Image (spheres, coloured by chain):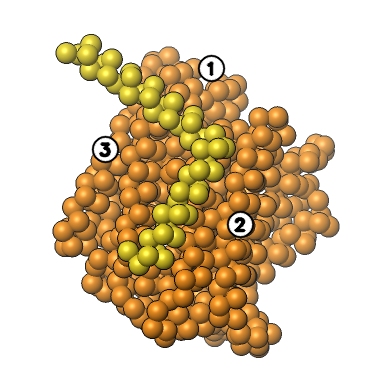
Chain colours: A orange, B yellow
Amino acid sequence: MSPAWLAGALDLGGDLLVVPLMLPVVGLLLGLGLGGRHLGRVALPLMVLGLAAALAVAAAVFKAGAPLHYALGGWAPPLGVSLKADGLSVVLLLTSALVVLAVGIYAQRPFGVAPGAVETRSSLAFWMLLLGVWSGLNTVALGQDLFTLFVALELLTFSAVPLVALDGRAETLAAALRYLLFALLGSVLYLLGAVLFYGTYGTLDIALLAAAIGGADAVPAPVLAAASLMTVGLLAKTALFPLHLWLPPAHAGAPPAASAVLSALVVKGSFFLILRIWFDLMPMLLTGMAAQILGALGVAAILYGGLLALRQARLKLLVAYSTLAQLGYLFLIFPLAATSDPAGSTDVVTGGMLHLVSHALAKAGMFLAAGLIAASLGQDQISALGGIARALPITVLAFGLGGLALMGLEPSGAYLAKSLLDGPAAASGQWWWGLAMQAGGLLTAAYLIRVFYHALAGFSHPPSLKSRPARYQELVALALALGALLLGLLPAELLGLVAIGRSGVELGGLP
Amino acid sequence: MTIWLRRMGAALGRAIDRLDAELRRWPIAGAALLVATLLLGGSLLLGL
């Protein structure tokens, strides 16, 4: 029996979609009036409400077995703008709400203002930017036309970039500027693609565009050019190898809370839009060589990111290069979905989304744990971690469990995700994708065992700590890592949620 | 044998560090963006 609030929320139907969009905006408006001193405390209940709203949307979609729709102002497309929550949207909404709430709790200490203390610039900026990222992600999840999605993408970029440079040091400002310029280049390519779509079909609504493109005998050349421009623009924002020039420097100096959001959520927002374009807007793209190119870039990212992670001397940079590698797995969806039957394609998309969630939880937990270690030791050199497991057992446990989840040990979400991806790869005779996943798993184990080796050494000589993290910060990191590790225990019916709204698309062929 | 393997590993490590430093330079990143656009666009437009 569902609780009363959930039953009431389910009765709202499509109107429910407005709630996740409005909550971060309410926070932003409150922030303008309250300032940084109070915003952190006010944002937290909003984030709890946001998680409840995401759960309600998920329950409504699950109960209906069909996507929820909402037309803004009652105006249907092409005149108005519509919102839609399908299985993919629900996964992104829930992941964003969970990670943002966890980061919100964690950041109460570094970005909260104690009574009597002087309010700093970064305390206001951090909460405003975090709410901005959350708002952008929710709009990416629910937006149904290419221009709304562009606005969401820009909101995401313009909130994420200053998060990187919160400490205001010269090198972090340079890293943020590098990120901004590259992300803007991506935005220009996306917008150019959207213009070509509008010029050809006179609408930007995804459902209308998909119907027009699917109903035509041949896809016009400008539309194919638009798809490639938008995809490459989004790849730059996702930092897929070899377009990752902004990612390592951005993480090097960013606060741990910002790195967690960047790695777990921001890069997933642009990946989510690639999924929308390739699976909802133009599923016929999947049949061609372009899908294989995306898969090959994914494999290159897995191997390259893994090798680079092995080479890092700093813990934070190791986790950053690990992100580069883990993003590669997401791009195996494209070639695998292209060559699978509809049931196999559903498994592939489900596996991909599961990997997205699993990586988001594990990596957010690992970045937060790495940040606590760095703050306690005053530096994050991997070779200087000796004895840290004794000094900060919960933090190291959180990092370790996150690492095990990344490696794909049973019952982690990554294990289940790789199983779901491996099945169709084997069934279609494409063993090389499976081999790349196994190689990636080995590399992940290698670079994480290197950290464990140093962290577990010198157990009888714990280092002297400059400061101790708050227990709740350690528990937040641990909860995220545990979530990633136990994700594989989700019942199969719940995994079916991802496929809701995908039945209209026969992957691997024309709709 | 062990020394030979260590040397090979170190050389591979230095090579990949060097490659990464190159890939994080603007002209190379710009060229990668262009090549990716041409590859994807070309394969889609030519119907490959």
Earlier-in-chain disc, 2 versus 1: 2
Residue identified by numbered label 3 = A442
Residue at image position (49%, 65%) is A225
Residue A288's x, y, as percent?
32, 65
Task: Relative to A386, say whether A175 is above or below.
Answer: below
Chain ID of residue with mark 1: A
Tag 3, which secondary structure?
Answer: helix
Amino acid at dot 2? Ser
**Residue sitting nearer the eye, A14 or B13:** B13
Q: Nearer the viewer, mark 3 or mark 2?
A: 2
Q: CA distance from mark 1 to mark 3?
A: 33 Å
Instruction: Look at the image and tell me whether residue A4 can be seen.
Output: no
Instruction: Look at the image and tell me whether residue A383 can be seen.
Output: yes
Residue at image position (55%, 80%) is A201
Amino acid at dot 1? Ser
Residue identified by numbered label 1 = A464
Residue B2's x, y, as percent?
20, 13
Task: Relative to A41, say whether A245 is above or below.
Answer: above
**Residue sitting nearer the eye, A233 or A1:** A233
Q: Which mark is residue A187?
A: 2
Q: Which mark is residue A297?
A: none
Task: Relative to A415, say whether A74 is above or below.
Answer: below
Amino acid at dot 3? Leu
Tag 1, which secondary structure?
Answer: loop
Tell me the quarter of the image containing the N terminus of chain A.
bottom left
